[in-house]
Amino acid sequence: RVQTTKYIVSGNKSCIGDVTQPTNLQKECQYESTKAIGESIDKYSSIPSVTLCKSICRHIQACQAFTYSRNTSTCTLLADAELSDRDHNYVTGHKSCDGYIPNCFVNDFEYSGTDVDVVKNVGHVQECQKLCQDIPYCFFWTYHSDIEQCTRKSSVRRIKHHSFATSGSRNCHDSIIKSVEFTGYGSLDQYVDVKTLDDCQQKCQEDYRCSFWNLYSISSNKSLKICETRYSYSDLAFNHNCKSGYKWNIFLPKHAKSIDCSWEGVKLQTGPLDLIEGRVFSHDQCQYFCRTKENCTFWSYHHKKGKCFLFDTNSMEHLKNDMGFISGPKYCDGTCYSKNVRFNAKKILTLNNVKSPVTCQSYCKREIQCKGFNYVRSTNICLLVKEGPKQYDSEVISGIKTCKAKEKNVFVNLKDCYDYGVDYKEGDIMQVNGIIAPWECQLECQKVQRCNHWTYKKKCLLKTDHKGLTYTLNKN
């Protein structure tokens, strides 16, 4: 079920002037203690505020007015309307007012993600946006008017309802996330009658439940595109055939774009803690090296030269734009995990003495049936949980060296790069010990020039080519 906290609401905080008037409504934004009657388009229950009801009307082309019941939290959309009797339980208003800017600010919602810092005693929302523009690694911001506080952020992962919050981005320019798709739970609908990115975004804007969208191009048919709308997502996956975005444009700075937990076009300019010898094949691999080094907190990867630079905890102060680099933090802390949240699902396995949620997540990635994990910080216990009735055995996971999209499958995620329950035979180069997850085995393969395939079976085996397959997993 979609929760109201997933909605995105855009617009100005103040209601000024008018645009198009519905029948018999005066030139005001809304009427307190007043009910309207007219041709009803749709009715929505469990709507928490007048603001959200008004925003739903704004996002639906046929809606010209709305009536909101405070008693029942019901929002009724109207094609035309006239004022009826006074009723203290109702608020009535028309669709829009002058100054409505859907692309710049998100009112009554706060962004949850990676915070850069908090600035207090900020007088207004425009000042908060200016403060974000003053530093190179602020991409988003949230302003709380009740306490005059501005939170500068480097990334956004969730959007939550907050009555006194206004959020936005560094600049007001369109942003599209290329070669990345929103994956996991939260899919709504799929459309084939789309031609452009704007068409797909409009599909999302027309559905009050939608917050994110993916537009897929089909390799075998370039004229065919599929638009997927979503109310949420659990992960981001690399996909050459996909472009994604938000319901309303959440904008990135002109010379940088987000790649999951990383920033493209950003370099850390202080002296590095370490330089990895030899060629590093991807920014994911560079992040992996950072994770294996105790003092590393941030990393920078030069994709043309294949160089990986590791940095210590002071590096965040020295970010600058550089189009040759991709940079990011050691972990996706604050964006990948939901703190103070427990999955109430059937338990698969309990692991003791697990040192961090990252390690716990790695064990989950190793188990095919695992859909999530609970990490108890006080006891260092890792609980792996699953969904659905199917039982799986994850002893063997294999995959190719490079994770490429399968043309026969439009919706590609990391699992499509792996052959679960398949053991690649022969062609062994070497065995790598100390590997706790299949994606780490894949990274080890990428480091060895002769390696083209790998098999993970509680240990990592690197291979040139394979001459046969052995199926060891029964999914039925």
Image: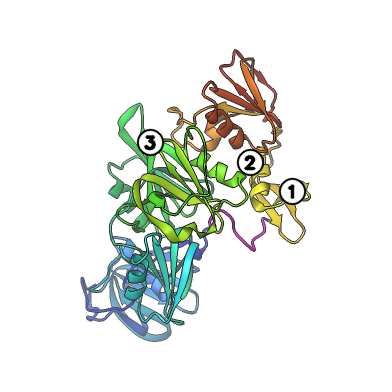
The answer to whether one can see residue 47 in this image is no
Residue 358 shows which numbered tag? none
Looking at the rendered image, the disc whose residue lies closer to the viewer, 3 or 2, is: 3
Instruction: Compare residues 369 and 285 and report the one nearer the observer.
Output: 285
Rendered residue at 37%/73% (across/down): 128
Rendered residue at 48%/57% (across/down): 315
Instruction: Compare residues 416 and 366 and report the one nearer the observer.
Output: 366
| Disc 3 residue crowd, few under 14, some 14–19, many 20+, Cα 10 Å | few
Quadrant in the picture for residue 318: bottom left
Residue beneath label 3, please?
304
Amino acid type for the residue under numbered disc 3: Lys
Of labels 3 and 1, earlier in sequence is: 3
Q: Label 1, label 2: how many angstroms apart (C-alpha)?
A: 15 Å
Q: Is residue 74 left or right of residue 294?
A: left
The correct choice, above or below, for 68 with respect to 315 in the image is below
The correct choice, above or below, for 437 with respect to 21 in the image is above
Outermost residue on the front side: it is 271
SS class, disc 2? helix
Quadrant of the snapshot with the C terminus: top right
SS class, disc 3? loop
Q: Is residue 65 left or right of residue 141?
A: left
SS class, disc 1? strand
User: The magenta stretch spans which residues?
Assistant: 335-343
Judge whether residue 340 is colored magenta: yes
Residue beneath label 1, please?
347
Q: Is residue 109 left or right of residue 195?
A: right
Residue beneath label 2, please?
365
Amino acid type for the residue under numbered disc 2: Lys
